[in-house]
Image (cartoon, rainbow, N blue to C red):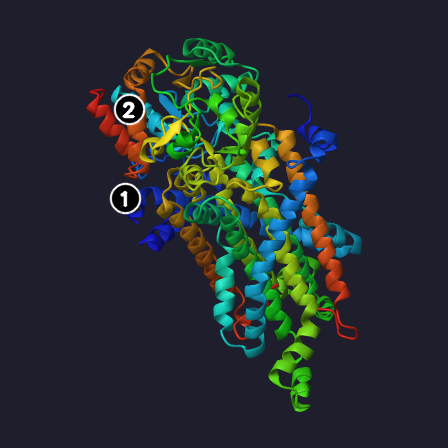
């Protein structure tokens, strides 16, 4: 079965010839787009590879939760009669921000705090509204933020229920009283984030060492925590693993960690109709919704397209 | 961030603060070397005896060549992530992947070392009454040492260039600079880490090349 | 395994883009390696230089190269051109020394006889030297093909569609079947391409059928 499909693609590849250079049939995680492939743009053309003027290009980070939100936007845009080109799983900011800036992407779900820090590494915590305004102002010309959602995907200092109980932990500040050396499993960039080791030392007087696990708070990070390899993990608050494993995100009374509300970054290509379609999703997306959407992705292993279709129908948005 | 990132990478390397402590360059380089050595060593335990056996007896030759070929095609990042999900963070997962990466070169080296021995020489040894074990250890292996070392050379260079992936799943090594540099858009740091990996690979390559020359038996024609 | 069955379309698309990215660099590496190897073989010091440069190139970790190359060639990270050039560089690093060995394996006496028989330089190259270097060249191309198909996966980390994307997504969602599908299919692609090259070699060089080709 698999061999057949790869052979077919091999033949197709030879037929298309060298000119295509890998541009065909790439790009979309969305099974609907394959086969028909009206865009033909597919893969990766950011160099003047803008799609037709009527097409809105929706991108996502290489993060399943972000892809689901992007797919919510995409299907909502399609329901509004627009043509959508999906470009999902585009690395992290170092890869997709230049593509947003040069117009190869039109819509991408972002998180207010981390977006702001991408442009202003000195930015400190503030209210969600203030962070949103600051991030919007920090964006280069041609890009803007739409309103943000209630749903957040915030970094956290999370520990196990057992460790929290044994050391009477409720807030990050309580970690200062823990005797043993504290290790936190997190993506490598946590090391240099303002709420990373330096920030937590400064604000709460807590020493932590980062154990880098590049799965964005995924199952390996969680396993490191539950196995006791580390005492803490930087989990995103929309992660269904927190409830599933009875984990405890420690409170952050000093607001060390920036708010990370879900927010769409859009280009000038997004007109009033498109904006309305995206904003309708944002207004309906609660924090619990996002956890549930993520749960369907990791526990039921559903595709982003199926998850999005069901949610939009449930909310009456399509 | 302005200026040429390559020059900034050199400046990063020159900074004294980056040369001390548990995340300093000497420590990270040692970790990197340690992962490489461990991966190649474990792979050698499997591949060298197997290669010698296959080369000496000719049994399982096509299977050995085919599986070594398939192993070359396994993407190391896929193996690291797969093993990590099964085994958790730490060194075991990347180490297993490095072993898979190193085995083909070592196997090919050991196998071709034995096979390259002149059949006339081997027959002469047999005629003198040497046992098969003696033929292997006293004739075929000594003659083939440069090729065996060549296998180590290929394996080591491959693993040292790939050992950055250890940092993907909670370990140290020079990959720490590369991934931190990549994810925090600190390109000078990423380039500096890459330069260190390249330098290490070249040094090891050169050292093993010299070893290859030195171990060539006197009088035997060089392979 | 149910993930695999429910996502066959996605897997097929990833496999297709994977192959489309792998094939051009393999061809480019082969085509460029021939003149470079001839040039290298013309001077002893050039040959040393080329071998050293190849070693240097191959030691560059691939992920940083994919990220940095755009700054030098002026594309974006996910541009097909970026991936093609990066992979071609790795291909050349393997292929130029192999081609250099291949041409050195052709006996000078044979070449001299060809000249004596009246072959013009171009005809001598295409009708005598290249076919005789063929078996060693083929061995080199086989290594380049397998290595390139494996290396394409690295682009998946940066959002270039390939089977490598299945590693990243599967790793973050904890879907082992997704990663395993990516690993197995990459190996299958490599093994199939390798087999195809062997068959192609037999068709183009029928005289090699009898004896086996020594791999480098």
Q: Nearer the viewer, residue A184 or C148?
A: A184
Relative image position of residue B135 (x, y in whole percent) = 65, 81
Callout 1: 10 Å neighbours few (<14), some, many (20+)?
Answer: few
Q: Identify which residue is drawn at 71% across, 58% down.
A: B208
Q: Nearer the viewer, mark 1 or mark 2?
A: 2
Numbered label attached to residue A289: 2
Callout 2: 10 Å neighbours few (<14), some, many (20+)?
Answer: some
Q: Is residue B222 left or right of residue A139?
A: right
Label 1 chain ID: C
Q: Identify which residue is drawn at 31% across, 47% down.
A: C4
Provide the secondary structure element on which disc 1 rests: helix
Q: Identify which residue is drawn at 70% across, 74% down.
A: B142
Relative image position of residue A285 (x, y in whole percent) = 30, 20
Q: How far is mark 1 from mark 2, CA to CA?
A: 24 Å
Decide if residue C209 is in sight here. Answer: yes
Q: Quadrant of the C terminus of chain C?
A: bottom right
Q: Identify which residue is drawn at 43% across, 50% down.
A: C183
Q: Nearer the viewer, residue C67 or C85?
A: C67
Q: Is residue A47 left or right of residue B112?
A: left
Q: How many badges with numbers are in the image?
A: 2
Q: Is residue A281 left or right of residue C125?
A: left
Q: Quadrant of residue B45?
A: bottom right
Relative image position of residue A275 (x, y in whole percent) = 34, 14
Provide the secondary structure element on which disc 2 rests: helix
Mark 1 vs mark 2: tell me if same chain. Answer: no
Q: Which residue is mark 1?
A: C6
Decide if residue A100 is in sight here. Answer: no
Q: Quadrant of residue B57?
A: bottom right
Label 2 chain ID: A
């Amino acid at each position: 079965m698999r061999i057949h499909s790869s052979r077919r693609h091999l033949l197709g590849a030879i037929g298309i010839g060298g000119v295509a250079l890998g541009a065909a049939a790439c790009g979309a995680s969305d099974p609907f787009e394959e086969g028909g492939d009206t865009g033909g743009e597919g893969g990766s053309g950011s160099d003047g590879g803008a799609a037709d003027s009527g097409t809105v290009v929706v991108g996502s980070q290489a993060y399943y939760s972000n892809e689901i939100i992007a797919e919510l936007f995409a299907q909502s845009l399609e329901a509004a009669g627009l043509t959508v080109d999906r470009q999902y799983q585009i690395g992290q900011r170092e890869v997709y921000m230049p593509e947003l800036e040069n117009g190869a992407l039109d819509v991408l779900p972002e998180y207010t705090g981390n977006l702001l820090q991408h442009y202003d590494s000195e930015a400190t915590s503030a209210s969600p509204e203030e962070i949103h305004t600051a991030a919007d102002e920090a964006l280069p010309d041609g890009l803007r933020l739409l309103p943000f959602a209630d749903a957040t995907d915030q970094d956290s200092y999370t520990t196990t229920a057992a460790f929290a109980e044994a050391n009477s932990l409720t807030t990050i500040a309580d970690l200062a009283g823990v005797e043993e050396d504290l290790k936190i499993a997190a993506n490598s960039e946590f090391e240099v984030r303002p709420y990373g080791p330096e920030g937590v030392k400064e604000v709460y007087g807590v020493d932590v060492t980062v154990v880098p696990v590049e799965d964005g708070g995924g199952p390996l990070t969680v396993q490191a925590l539950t196995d006791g390899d580390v005492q803490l993990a930087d989990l995103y608050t929309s992660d269904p693993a927190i409830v599933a494993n009875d984990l405890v995100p420690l409170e952050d009374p000093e607001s060390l960690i920036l708010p990370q509300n879900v927010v769409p970054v859009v280009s000038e290509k997004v007109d009033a109709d498109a904006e309305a379609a995206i904003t309708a999703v944002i207004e309906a997306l609660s924090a619990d919704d996002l956890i549930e959407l993520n749960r369907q992705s990791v526990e039921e292993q559903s595709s982003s397209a199926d998850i999005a279709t069901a949610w939009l129908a449930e909310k009456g948005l399509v | 961030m302005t200026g040429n990132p390559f020059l900034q990478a050199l400046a990063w390397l020159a900074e004294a603060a980056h040369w001390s402590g548990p995340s300093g360059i000497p420590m990270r380089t040692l970790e990197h070397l340690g992962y490489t050595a461990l991966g190649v060593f474990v792979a050698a335990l499997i591949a060298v005896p197997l290669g010698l056996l296959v080369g000496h007896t000719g049994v399982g030759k096509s299977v050995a060549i085919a599986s070594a070929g398939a192993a070359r095609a396994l993407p190391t990042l896929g193996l690291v992530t797969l093993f990590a999900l099964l085994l958790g963070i730490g060194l075991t997962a990347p180490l297993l992947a490095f072993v898979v990466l190193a085995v083909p070169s070592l196997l090919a080296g050991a196998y071709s070392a034995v096979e390259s021995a002149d059949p006339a020489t081997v027959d002469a040894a047999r005629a003198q009454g040497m046992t098969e074990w003696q033929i292997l250890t006293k004739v075929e292996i000594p003659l083939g040492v440069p090729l065996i070392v060549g296998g180590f050379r290929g394996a080591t260079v491959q693993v040292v260039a790939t050992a950055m992936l250890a940092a993907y799943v909670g370990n140290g090594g020079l990959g720490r600079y590369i991934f931190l540099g990549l994810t925090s858009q600190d390109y000078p740091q990423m380039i500096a880490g890459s330069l260190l990996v390249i330098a290490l690979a070249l040094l090891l390559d050169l050292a093993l090349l010299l070893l290859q020359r030195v171990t060539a038996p006197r009088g035997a024609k060089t392979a | 395994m149910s993930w695999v069955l429910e996502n066959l379309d996605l897997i097929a698309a990833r496999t297709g883009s994977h192959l489309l990215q792998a094939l051009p660099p393999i061809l480019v590496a082969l085509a460029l390696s021939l003149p470079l190897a001839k040039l290298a073989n013309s001077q002893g010091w050039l040959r040393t230089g080329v071998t050293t440069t190849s070693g240097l190139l191959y030691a560059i970790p691939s992920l940083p190269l994919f990220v940095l190359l755009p700054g030098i060639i002026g594309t974006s990270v996910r541009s097909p051109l970026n991936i093609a050039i990066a992979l071609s560089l790795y291909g050349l690093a393997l292929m130029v020394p192999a081609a250099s060995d291949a041409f050195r394996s052709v006996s000078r006496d044979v070449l001299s006889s060809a000249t004596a028989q009246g072959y013009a330089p171009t005809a001598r190259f295409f009708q005598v030297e290249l076919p005789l270097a063929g078996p060693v060249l083929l061995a080199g191309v086989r290594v380049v093909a397998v290595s390139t198909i494996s290396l394409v996966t690295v682009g998946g980390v940066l959002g270039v569609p390939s089977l490598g994307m299945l590693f990243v997504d599967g790793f973050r969602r904890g879907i082992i079947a997704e990663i395993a599908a990516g690993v197995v299919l990459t190996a299958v692609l490599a093994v199939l391409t390798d087999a195809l090259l062997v068959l192609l070699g037999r068709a183009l060089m029928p005289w090699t059928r009898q004896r086996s080709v020594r791999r480098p």
